[in-house]
Image (cartoon, rainbow, N blue to C red):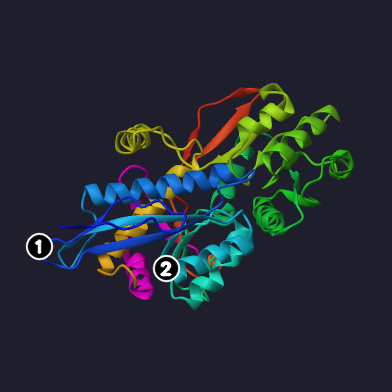
Amino acid sequence: MKISIGRLLCGTVLASAALIGGATACELKVGVPAVLSGPAAQWGIALRGAMEFAAKEAMEEKRIVINGVPCTVSVMPIDTKYTAEGAASAMNAFAAANIKVIVGPVGSPEVTGMKPVAKRNRMVAMVNSFAKNSIGPEWPTVFHIGPGPSGWAGPIIDEGLKRFKFKSVAIVAPNDQGGTDIASVNAQIFKAKGVAPTEEYYQRGTTNFAPIVTRMLAAKPDAIDLASSPAGDAGIIVKQLRQAGFNGPIFRLGGPGTEEIARVAGGYDVLKDFLWFEPIAMDDNTRALEKKYEKLMGAPRPENADFFRWVFAARMTLKAIQAAQSIDDAEKISAAMRKLPVEDEHIGKGHWIGQKFFGINQEMSYPFAIGIIEGGKQQPYKRADAVKEG
């Protein structure tokens, strides 16, 4: 006997609940607050695709069995529009639907808006944000898919110091939390590595970067860090820096986006010497995950490389549910999550970190890649081990 479940608001239902052996069907509903419109939509589409894949995988392989009953898993995505208000609205919709498990969102503004709703409604959430307060002791059921700049910036700076000579760096980013939190963290890490930093901020939406470039170069930096400047902005800044005669290395310690930066700047020859964070070190295991996605979902995986991180996060959340033997008790699921090893069958092994930076050990750290362009030529990605705190 099958029980049909209607569509959950604007969500995608991946399976029907069933009565198994006379027992009440187990139905896990996962809320996905994701930016699905506007310039950042690629990130949200990667999140949604990863969660839908993990849900279907869990059902086909019976990864969630509560009290002997295999669970169906349905996904309810809601567009946050990359705003705090949109994320809070999505979370309130999840609360109204009695959804207690959340995977997402992707950015700091959204996480700022969703955390109070998660705490008030006793939800467990796996989020992504580079804000300094993205997680913390006051949010004990909120976990971070990580690592953030506090985890990845050090190894990339070390690689830059091996390849290029520089003793000072100018850091540029937007003047909101999405920029200042990342840039200030990067500045601390550069300083700890013996590199003197200066910081320059601009209004998001700026189109004329000439005054900013002039101010940056007035400090006579040996290197530049674009931090979390959007790829389009970063490309213009790089182009104008090179036109102004700056020949030093350029870092992008706020995330990927190199292809778009190169396109706007005028090519890899303009980037010249360039290092950046790449979320996943691609190898045979991650390529096997791509193939599994295509087989299971009938289409190529979402383009954005954050897809891999969100698969890891979704699987960890589902593992915690299985270990807790609960689909709706946030405290039990959180307690189970803390005990799990940070490990994924396709992405590798890592560690829980965050105590030193956030005051709570709830950030996942796992292997990533360092992207390198040297002399205008892209070099092989360099795999970086999962960062430990110590």
* Magenta-colored span: 329-355
Q: Residue 125 appears at what percent x and percent y?
A: 45, 64
| 379 relative to 96, above or below | above
Amino acid at dot 2? Ala
Mark pair 1, 2: CA separation: 27 Å
Residue found farthest to the left = 21
Identify the residue position indicated by label 2 in the image: 97
State the residue in front, 164 or 285. Answer: 285
Q: Residue at x 60, y 60 (%)?
A: 86
Q: Is residue 330 magenta?
A: yes
Q: Residue at x 43, y 54 (%)?
A: 11
Q: Residue 137 appears at what percent x and percent y?
A: 51, 75
State the residue in front, 273 or 178. Answer: 178
Is 345 placed left or right of 378 in the picture?
left
Label 1 sits on a secondary structure element that is loop
Q: Residue at x 78, y 52 (%)?
A: 199
Identify the residue position indicated by label 1 in the image: 21
Is 291 placed left or right of 103 in the picture?
left
Label 2 sits on a secondary structure element that is loop
